[in-house]
Image (cartoon, rainbow, N blue to C red):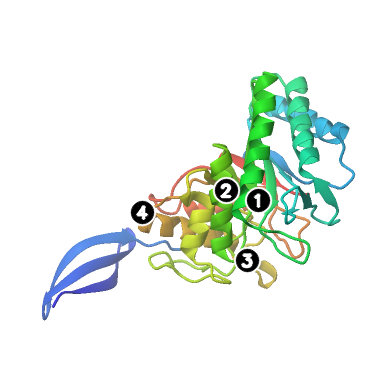
Amino acid sequence: MLNELEVVLENGSGKFRVLAMKLIAGTFVVLGSIPLLSAPAFANPVVPPIDNFYYVPYYASAATTNTWGCDQAQADANTGHNSIVVLDFGRQNASGSGTYLIGSNSFMALSTEQALTEQFALGYQQCGTHAEYLTLTMGTTNYSNSTGSNLTYSNGSIWGQTVQGAINNIVSANYVNVTIDGAGDWESWGAFSELVNWESGYVSATNASIYDFGTADGCRDYYNQELNNHYCNNGWYQDSVVTASWGWPPAFALPEIYYNGCNSYAVEDIQWGMISLRAVNNGTGPIYFSGSLASPSAPGSCESPQGAYIDLWNVINNTPSTAMTPNFATSLG
């Protein structure tokens, strides 16, 4: 009878998980080895310019987002760097006609949100050099309470149609240095199957990408936790987070890195490093991280925008199979 055996060996190059097949008692054939992550030697990568993340307020007007776009264009011109910006509109209502905004819980119609997004793009187009490029994203969330969200196939399709409508309008207006995509604060608030339904609706309506700016709540936040599909929270597993942030075709990862283990919170950079290595081991990855998202104003946060980027960079570059350099660093507040 054949049995797999898993052992951990250590040599001068570090630790390796060795997979072997038991043939007869006392005899093994080594099938391969997978390098294990351990605490990285700290490095200081070059941090990109910090881009803005916005919780869109109830009082936002065309002039508001046009000014935001102009400001971003001028900042990009000063640094010569491309940018990514998230406009977070909060939870969809049951019909998909609008959202409840983060903070105020005020309702805003989806048609207004599309117009505000297009005004941001216009501001960027008007004030930029056209040498830099903006990825502008329309963000929602799978957070659920008594007023929404409703993660259904229909609502995903409606969000995709709105993103596609904005794309069509800026293409018609010949905005040459802006693209519009979707974004989602995907976290383990609701059933993962609901998010899958929503995602299916989204891709039925648009080819636009969608950026996951959520968390990996409850997932393992210490090293050597990547081979098995570990449980996280509320029916989510590491593979669920892989799917939400990378594993389905339009997805890209822009994860929240608010905490590095401070104030009894998780070590979020290690959570994401383990999830990327899990993606390698399940054949989906590694995850391509577009950037990091910090929020110095979040309760208990101890990560600066620069620190969030550096911590994520160090973890994912600790092993060749997940190594890459994210293009962006973003921050709320």
State the residue in front, 149 or 304.
Answer: 149
State the residue in front, 254 or 58.
Answer: 58
Give how far apart the Cα atoms at labels 3 and 4 are: 26 Å
Give how far apart the Cα atoms at labels 4 and 1 are: 30 Å
- Tell me if residue 105 comes above or below residue 172 in the rendering: below
Q: Which amino acid is tagged 2? A: Gly
**Mark 3 or mark 2, which is nearer to you?**
2
Q: Residue at x 75, y 49 (%)?
A: 332
> Which residue matches tag 4?
283
Quadrant of the snapshot with the N terminus = bottom left
> Which residue matches tag 1?
155
Q: Residue at x 81, y 35 (%)?
A: 65
Residue count near mark 1 (Cα–Cα under 10 Å), binned few <14, some 14–19, many ≥20? many
Q: Quadrant of residue 227?
A: bottom left
Residue 326: where, in percent of width, then height? 54, 42
SS at badge 4: loop
What label sits on residue 190 in the rendered view? 3
Residue 112: where, in percent of width, then height? 81, 39
Relative side of 216 to 294, left or right = left
Give how far apart the Cα atoms at labels 3 and 2 are: 17 Å
> Which residue matches tag 2?
201
Residue count near mark 3 (Cα–Cα under 10 Å), binned few <14, some 14–19, many ≥20? many
Residue 274: where, in percent of width, then height? 47, 61
**Mark 4 or mark 2, which is nearer to you?**
2
Q: Which amino acid is tagged 3? A: Gly
Q: Earlier in the sequence, mark 1 or mark 2?
A: 1
Q: Which amino acid is tagged 1? A: Asn
